Amino acid sequence: RGALNRQLLWLIQHHPELSLTTMTAMLAPRGGRWNTPNDYQRLTSAWEQALANHSDSADVLFNAGAFFAQTDPERALALLQRVRSLDTSRDLDTLPKIASIYASAIETHSKLRNVIENSTDSALLSEVGTALTGRGMEEKGLELLQRDIDLDPGNPRWRDALESAKAEPIRQRNYRHALDRFRARQ
């Protein structure tokens, strides 16, 4: 446990832009199998310093956003939105992370829920709606996807996302049945 945290700390301090540093997002703030609360605090401090030193690096902002997503979702969203403003080509990485934070906010009824409820960002609504259907919140996910279509009716991507989301419960059920059949053969 100690060696992993020392390596992650070194990476954040010397190469915070590397995607490998997103591994720090798996660590628990209260401690857990891979870290203690003190380890987590040292990593938090290292990320703070990395952000101060590399405030215009989309890679560093993205990696720090992934780290803060569990403990400070508002901060994580601000960092990830900054990534979007610096480098729109990163949307394939950034939007799913943002959507995951908002989907969690909707599940837990946090104040961030209002932000997504009032959003007019079609790409974000599509990602959050898709994430929600994948988490078993089909009704809310489909509602966001339909709102997405209403905002931008001429874009076929949103209609395709809605149709795919409608099929998600069937995909999940088929997956569970296949897994049950596999386990029965074991």
Image: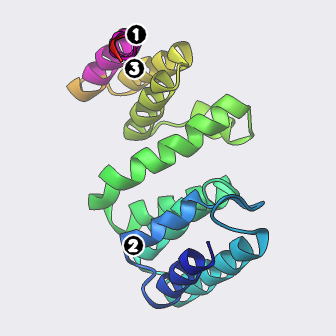
Disc assigned to residue 150: 3
What is the residue that sits farthest to the front in this orientation?
A: 186
Residues rendered magenta in the picture? 159-184
Q: Residue at x 49, y 60 (%)?
A: 80
Mark 3, secondary structure of its residue: helix
- Image height check: is 52 above or below 80? below
> Real-space Cα distance between discs 2 and 3?
33 Å
What residue does disc 1 label? 173
Instruction: Quadrant for the N terminus, please.
Output: bottom right
Q: Nearer the viewer, mark 2 or mark 3?
A: 2
Residue kind at label 2, given as amino acid type? Asp
- Image height check: is 103 above or below 81? above
- Image height check: is 176 above or below 79? above
Mark 2, secondary structure of its residue: helix
Looking at the magenta stretch, what is its main secondary structure? helix
Q: Position of residue 151 (x, y in %)?
A: 40, 26
What residue does disc 2 label? 59
